[in-house]
Image: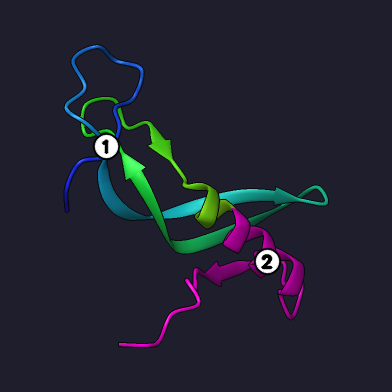
Amino acid sequence: MSPSPACRRPDCPGLSDWRIVHPVQVDGQTVIVDEVPAGVCLLCGETRLSGETRERLEQLLRSRPNRARIPFLEFDDGGEPG
């Protein structure tokens, strides 16, 4: 995984590509989304989501099938399995 653009720290070597657990507030409820692709700074922990990832998250959240007490979704990037 090659580093992507840096965080706000001047000594940041670049963000590394990771899959994270990402909490999102929806209608006053926290939804936990697992396996979300993100750039993560290994020095400060700052995370950044790409525009494409944010758009996919919005689609997932609009189409979630149920509203469990502690909602948990697994990120699906829309690609083929495997």
Where residue 44 appears, x then y in whole percent? 29, 25
46 lies above or below 2: above
Location of the C terminus by quadrant is bottom left
Alpha carbon separation for disc pair 2 and 1: 25 Å
Magenta-drawn segment? 55-82
13 lies above or below 34: above
Q: Nearer the viewer, residue 5 or 20?
A: 5
Q: Secondary structure at mark 1?
A: loop
Q: Secondary structure at mark 2?
A: helix
Where residue 10 appears, x then y in whole percent? 24, 11
Where residue 62 appears, x then y in whole percent? 76, 67
Q: Residues within 10 Å of mark 1 (few under 14, many from 20)?
A: many
Residue drawn where x is 44% and y is 55% of the image: 21
Q: Give the image's coloring scheme.
A: rainbow
Label disc, if present, on residue 59 of the rendered structure = 2
Where residue 41 appears, x then y in whole percent? 27, 33
Residue drawn where x is 43% and y is 39% of the image: 48
* Relative horizontal placement of residue 73, taking residue 82 as reference (left or right): right
Residue 56 falls within the magenta-colored stretch: yes
Q: Label 1 amino acid?
A: Leu
- In the rendered image, which residue does mark 1 sit on? 15
Given the current orientation, which residue lies at the most extreme top position? Answer: 10
Q: Nearer the viewer, residue 78 or 18?
A: 78
Q: Residues within 10 Å of mark 2 (few under 14, many from 20)?
A: few
Residue drawn where x is 56% and y is 50% of the image: 23
Location of residue 12 by image quarter: top left
Do the residues under discs 2 and 1 have CB atoms within 8 angstroms? no
Given the current orientation, which residue lies at the most extreme right position? Answer: 27
Given the current orientation, which residue lies at the most extreme bottom position? Answer: 81
Q: Label 2 amino acid?
A: Gln
Residue 47 falls within the magenta-colored stretch: no
Label disc, if present, on residue 80 of the rendered structure = none
